Image: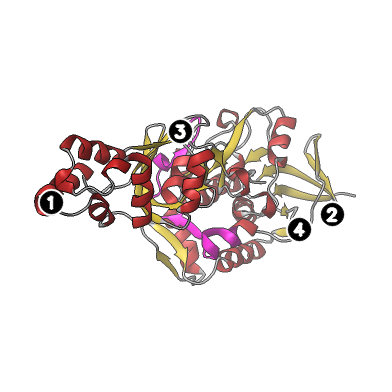
């Protein structure tokens, strides 16, 4: 005989565990079925092992979706302050790393332990190694997997996206949504490093390890944070953020001096340091290795010239390059290193109040499997908590 529950949750990640807590606290009989050998693997590895669990400045404008208004309801009803209250209840020490990004002082394990403790208190049953799941609907939901058969009135898809397959990510949630007739928007990797080919790849390889503050713009959306040159291309927070707005075949633009005016620096040096060489002036503001690569690429004739000897027009041209360096990525590193998956279950299929499927009663989609993707900095975890609470209050 199949085991009977009120609520079956597929996926024991951030969204799945939070939904289980909310439902269990309402007296619902809940089981969480996780395909991996343990719950919360992405929680454990996030934030360099310290879990950037939310952001103080979280708001709907920090999310991408085909329907940008969809996330408003859930985010407004379970806010960052609500999750912080839960963290403080469990005595977890945390800090603001900057820009409102909250991290555990010690370890991501504390967040996972908190969620599991809350699940236990709410009477939630958690099963791991639940592989090869098959789902059917007949006056309720029946899930069969390697751990047996489970029947429930409500089924929650909290299986995550495609990012970081080595952590167990798969397309199961999308396939299941399609099985029930839901529209699933095209997916692609988000918050992921750029890669380059040819001469630009060789340049980034030589600069591997060099970092600096910069503004990266893709599709008219700009982010100012650090960038990092790598053996394969360009990473760092600003590049990762821009990647979510980039389309294959298009350019990105780098402003290497986001907090100053390159033209003012160069023209001003003609008066203040007329005998100084151009690379010396620029090395006061940029990593020397980058300056040498750029001069070989874009202004070799002026490389050894003294500033006073270089025409103003040439200095303006060089300044323009520094503040609008146009690059064309070959691609990104893809799901292998992506922090999130863009696209997913079409929000038009779901109630923004409850996350329930409009055309399939009792079926809910939460977290990363839904077409709502946050910026870097704790926003995706907050969507997981908020969307899970929205469903957990009604399943």
Examine the structure image and report whether residue 63 is included in the region drawn in magenta: yes
The residue under the point 53% across, 39% down is: 198
Left/right of residue 313 with respect to residue 376 in the rendered view: left
What's the colour scheme? secondary structure
Residue 274: which numbered mark, if any? 1
Mark 3 — residue?
68
What segment is highlighted magenta in the picture? 43-68
Is 198 situated above or below 236? above
Q: Quadrant of residue 333?
A: top right
Does label 2 or label 1 sit earlier along the sequence? 2
Does label 1 or label 4 sit earlier along the sequence? 4
Mark 4 — residue?
128
State how far apart marks 2 and 1 are (Cα).
Answer: 77 Å
Mark 2 — residue?
147
Q: Quadrant of residue 242?
A: top left
Does label 3 or label 2 sit earlier along the sequence? 3
Q: Nearer the viewer, residue 173 or 224?
A: 224
Tag 3–tag 4 contact (CB < 8 Å): no
State how far apart marks 3 and 2 are (Cα).
Answer: 39 Å
The residue under the point 14% across, 46% down is: 308
Q: Quadrant of residue 252?
A: top left
Q: Secondary structure at mark 4?
A: loop
Tag 2–tag 1 contact (CB < 8 Å): no
Left/right of residue 18 with respect to residue 242 in the rendered view: right
Q: Secondary structure at mark 1?
A: loop
């Amino acid at each position: 005989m199949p085991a009977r529950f009120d609520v079956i949750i597929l996926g024991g990640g951030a969204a799945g565990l939070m939904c289980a807590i909310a439902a269990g606290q309402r007296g619902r009989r809940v089981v969480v079925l996780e395909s991996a050998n343990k719950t919360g693997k992405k929680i454990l590895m996030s934030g360099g092992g310290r879990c950037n669990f939310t952001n103080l400045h979280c708001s709907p404008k920090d999310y991408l979706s085909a329907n940008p208004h969809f996330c408003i309801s859930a985010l407004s009803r379970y806010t960052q302050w609500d999750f912080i209250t839960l963290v403080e209840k469990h005595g977890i020490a945390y800090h603001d790393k900057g820009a409102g990004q909250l991290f555990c002082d010690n370890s991501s394990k504390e967040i996972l332990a908190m969620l599991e403790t809350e699940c236990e208190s709410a009477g939630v049953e958690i099963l791991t190694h639940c592989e090869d799941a098959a789902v059917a609907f007949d006056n309720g939901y029946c899930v069969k997997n390697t751990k047996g058969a489970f029947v429930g009135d409500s089924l929650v898809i909290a299986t995550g996206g495609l990012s970081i397959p080595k952590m167990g990510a798969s397309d199961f949630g999308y396939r299941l949504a399609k099985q029930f007739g839901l529209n699933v928007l095209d997916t692609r990797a988000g918050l992921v490093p750029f890669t380059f080919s040819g001469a630009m790849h060789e340049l980034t390889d030589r600069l591997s390890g060099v970092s600096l503050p910069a503004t990266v713009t893709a599709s008219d959306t700009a982010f100012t944070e650090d960038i990092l040159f790598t053996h394969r291309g360009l990473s760092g927070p600003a590049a990762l953020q821009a990647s979510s707005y980039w389309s294959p075949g298009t350019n990105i633009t780098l402003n290497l001096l986001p907090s100053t005016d390159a033209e003012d620096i160069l023209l001003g040096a003609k008066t203040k340091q007329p005998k100084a060489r151009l690379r010396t002036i620029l090395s006061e503001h940029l990593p020397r290795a980058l300056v040498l690569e750029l001069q070989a690429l874009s202004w070799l004739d002026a490389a050894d010239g003294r500033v006073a000897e270089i025409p103003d027009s040439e200095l303006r041209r060089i300044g323009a390059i520094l503040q609008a360096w146009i690059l064309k990525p070959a691609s990104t590193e893809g799901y292998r290193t992506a922090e999130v998956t863009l696209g997913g279950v079409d929000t038009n299929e779901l109630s923004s109040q409850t996350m329930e499927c409009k055309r399939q009663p009792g079926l809910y989609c939460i977290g990363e499997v839904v077409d709502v993707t946050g910026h870097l900095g704790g926003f995706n975890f907050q969507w997981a908590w908020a969307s899970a609470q929205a469903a957990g209050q009604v399943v």
